[in-house]
Image (cartoon, rainbow, N blue to C red):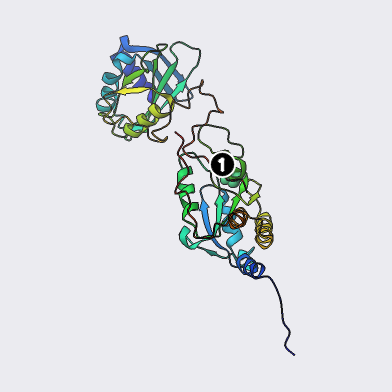
Amino acid sequence: MAKADLDKLVATFPEAIVATHSHCGDETAVVLPSHLSEIMRWLKESGGFDLLVDLTAVDYLGRDPRFEVVYHLRSMQTGNRLRIKVQIGEIEGGPPPEVDSVVSIWPAANWMEREVWDLYGIRFAGHPDLRRVLLYEEFVGHPLRKDYPKERRQPLVRRENLLP
Amino acid sequence: MAETYTSRLEEAISWARKYSLFTYPFATACCAMEFMATMAPKYDIARFGAEFPRFSPRQADLLFIVGTIVEKQAPVLLRIWEQMAEPKYVIAFGVCASTGGFYQNYSTVPGADQIVPVDVYIPGCPPRPEQVLDGLMLLQKKIQEGTTWVQQRDRREREKGIEPPRPRPRRLPVIS
Ligand code: SF4
């Protein structure tokens, strides 16, 4: 099972692992953002995790660090799954939070990172084309952040005096 | 002796129009399934003279807004409505098209009537075909009475002395 992969990861990068977690065959490692690229490349090339299943983010509003980017990996040879998380904080009034892009490791990350940028406002350093992917260019803000008001509308068109 | 019928020309035209509706299904979400059921033989919208879906707005005069409208799509819906042949009618099919339904978020338009004038609202998530046919009959009644949005606008303009073809704004202003 993937426990062996997780143990190998911890043994190889002991200084970069913040926490690990195993539950019902689901292995998770929280890693330092500074070591993300190195660890991901190692997982792909030496760990056999050749498929990036999903890349998403979570907003823990009120916690420090506020955001967590989650990578779901899978090995097509062994069928093992591994979840990698990085935690990134936000500087109040500063630039948007940023982590390293993994597009150069798994090209599948391209649109997923664009989606995370679109909806959570997390930037990916080294992404070839970091634009909004779901919302329109005129949109202001990042709507899946917990502090985005749910009633705020940003219409592209509205009717004008169409009452009979 | 031959019988003669008298009627006002406008009423005769409305009668003809209400039984030859050419629909444009603007189907965006799950409600489209129920629209298909309404079109299919069991409920058979053809009995009401509206059996012919035209997938070009330029050949249609009844816009069925079937499903959720998102903000990104709203300019498309407006463009489709502008392209349709006059006189044109709009039915909002399902709660999503009528009011936004259970969505209250950044992406969903709270009702298609924020973008185009809607004549008949059919509630339900999705509405049953019987409700759809009921809504269609309501629209036919409105066409006969001349109370749809387009007919009222035309009447108002005729009173002001504007005869078709009349100058129309090309697009509604874009609010960014
Ligand atoms: S009203 Fe219900 S069935 Fe219709 S589009 Fe909305 S969610 Fe789907």
Residue located at (54% from left, 24% from top): A149
Q: Position of residue A157 (x, y in %)?
A: 48, 40
Chain to which mark 1 belongs: B
Q: Badge 1 is on which residue?
A: B114
Label 1, ligand 1: CB separation under 8 Å: no
- Say if residue B156 shows up in the picture: yes
Q: Quadrant of the N terminus of chain A?
A: top left
Mark 1, Cα crowd under 10 Å, few <14 / some 14-19 / many 20+, is some
For the question of whether residue A1 can be seen, the reply is: no
In the picture as drawn, the residue positioned furthest to the bottom comes out as: B1
Relative horizontal placement of residue A65, taking residue B8 as reference (left or right): left
Amino acid under label 1? Gln
Q: Position of residue A100 (x, y in %)?
A: 30, 21
Front residue of A86 and A1: A86
List x then y, in percent, for residue B150: 59, 55
Is residue A104 or residue A76 the one in the foreground?
A104
Q: Looking at the image, which residue sits at the far front?
A: B161
B166 with respect to B4 (left or right)? left
Q: Which quadrant of the picture is home to ligand 1?
A: top right
